[in-house]
Image (tube, rainbow, N blue to C red):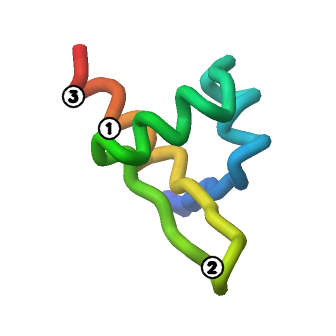
Amino acid sequence: MNIETNKFVNTAGLQDYLNMSRQAIFKHREKGLPFVRMGERAIIYNLDDVDRYFNSKK
């Protein structure tokens, strides 16, 4: 059985995942880091999309 799950994290979770500052994440968002806005303030990131983004930068 192959069950695919997408893992989503908020900005604090992404900071831990990437070991990166909040400011660095914001700069990458300006450069195209994919994110999903949930309502007016909440933002989440799909870790599969984040991995693809950074792998394309290598």
The residue labelled by disc 2 is 38
Disc on res. 52: 1
Q: Position of residue 43 (x, y in %)?
A: 63, 64
Instruction: Determine whether 5 is above or below 36 in the image.
Output: above
Question: Which circle's residue, 2 or 3, is located before the other in the chain?
Answer: 2
Instruction: Determine whether 37 is above or below 26 in the image.
Output: below
Question: Which circle's residue, 1 or 2, is located before the other in the chain?
Answer: 2
Q: Amino acid at mark 2?
A: Met
Q: Position of residue 17 (x, y in %)?
A: 67, 29
- Asked if the residues shown at circle 1 and circle 3 are in contact, with their CB atoms under 8 angstroms apart, the answer is yes
Instruction: Determine whether 8 is above or below 11 in the image.
Output: below
At x 49% / y 58%, what residue is drawn?
2
Q: Amino acid at mark 3?
A: Ser
The residue labelled by disc 3 is 56
Disc number lying in front (2 or 3): 2
Distance from label 1 to label 3 (Cα)? 6 Å
Viewer-proximal residue among 8 and 41: 41
Viewer-proximal residue among 51 and 57: 57
- Asked if the residues shown at circle 2 and circle 3 are in contact, with their CB atoms under 8 angstroms apart, the answer is no
Assign a secondary structure to mark 1.
helix
